[in-house]
Amino acid sequence: MTAQIIDGKALSKQLRAGFRERVGRLAQHGVRPGLAVILVGDNPASRVYVGNKVKACEECGVRSLHVALPADTPEVEMLARIAQLNADPTVHGILIQLPLPAHIDVRRVLEAISVHKDVDGFHLYNVGGLVVGNTIFPPCTPYGVQLLLDTTGTEVAGKNVVVVGASNIVGKPMALMLLQREATVTICHARTRDLAQHTILADILIVAAGKPGLIVPQMVKQGAIVIDVGINRLPDNRIVGDVDFDGVKEKASWITPVPGGVGPMTVTMLIENTLRSAERSLQGTPADHYQEWEAPMLKAV
Ligand code: NAP
């Protein structure tokens, strides 16, 4: 069996076309969605990520506000900047590019973002929402993976899902989102003993460990769906995921490539969350009533 490719680039393109229509509808109400991206310092990789986000905003008609702060910005100054953005009605989403310099308490700054503008979904309120199955802003990478899975037409309920990686931004929210969709979820991490013993049982295998070549064909069930979240730069400058793509594609039924799989979807879902925030702003509903107004999450198919 050679796996079918789950094309994140194509799905992103299709979703972004729909976004432009939503931006047009918002414009009829006098609202231009706005995303503020805060970058502290000049980490080259972070600059590339911020550049990609700004570009995606432009492509979809979303206003981007790039806030570049020097690496030695005191935490108190950063908190003040976030407070200004929270109060600015033209800003619907606030994103802090991670990692931050060591003198800044990441948790404290993430909690300073208004839950109404937390388009990365990292505020504890949104994390808690995910736990009870009704978050305002699903975190972008797992949200994108969920849509990629939908394109395969696979019913997630009842499937064995194995998530390799337990970070707060990918592995844990991914597991919670699929648990909410009634999958049987296993989370593996660096201390998991005999990883293969778990992965071989997966109908759906999602890998987000940041270890190139971690998943080889012997660890994959025949016909499994394999989603590779990993992004690793090899010494020869090639970008690869965590899965041995050439080997595993001969066993899987569906597989995401790297690049061109999950990567493009992450930025796309950031725009989705920003639009959702702008649309919410028209409804003017307070946060503690979010369950009543919450719209269903986007579906790819
Ligand atoms: P992270 O914070 O470093 O977390 C990695 C997770 O993988 C940890 O839970 C770690 O376990 C686990 N792990 C490490 N080695 C392992 C092993 N040998 N076996 C099993 N589990 C192992 O990384 P992250 O931020 O979640 O990102 C993971 C990967 O996804 C990276 O390559 C990153 O670049 C990529 N990524 C891609 C996108 C995208 O848009 N495509 C977005 C975000 C991240 P412990 O918890 O025990 O340490």
Image (cartoon, rainbow, N blue to C red):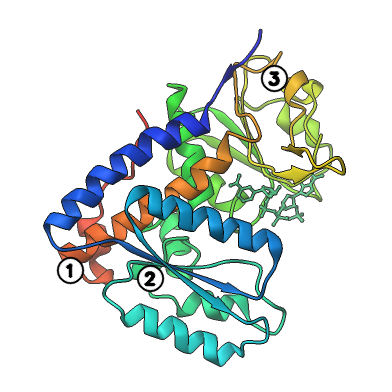
Asked whether the beta carbons under mark 3 and mark 2 sit within 8 Å of each other, the answer is no
Q: Position of residue 278 (x, y in %)?
A: 26, 61
Residue, disc 3 = 221
Q: Quadrant of the N terminus?
A: top right
From this view, report whether residue 146 is shown above or below residue 153: below
Which residue corresponds to the image point at 79% horizontal and 31% vertical from the top-left? 196
Q: CA distance from mark 3 to mark 2?
A: 40 Å
From this view, report whether residue 181 is shown above or below residue 292: above
Seen from the viewer's position, the closer of residues 146 and 27 is 27
From this view, report whether residue 153 is shown above or below residue 76: above
Q: Position of residue 222 (x, y in %)?
A: 68, 14
Mark carried by residue 172: none
Q: Is residue 225 left or right of residue 200?
A: left
Q: CA distance from mark 1 to mark 2?
A: 14 Å
Residue, disc 2 = 115
Q: Is residue 175 left or right of residue 284?
A: right
Q: Position of residue 251 (x, y in %)?
A: 70, 15
Give the quarter of the image for residue 291: bottom left
Secondary structure category for the residue under label 2: helix
- Density class for disc 1 (Cα within 10 Å; few <14, some 14-19, many ≥20) is few
- Density class for disc 3 (Cα within 10 Å; few <14, some 14-19, many ≥20) is many
The amino acid beneath tag 2 is Val
Q: Is residue 243 visible?
A: yes
Q: CA distance from mark 1 to mark 3?
A: 48 Å
Secondary structure category for the residue under label 3: loop
Residue, disc 1 = 284
Q: Earlier in the sequence, mark 3 or mark 2?
A: 2
Give the quarter of the image for residue 31: bottom left
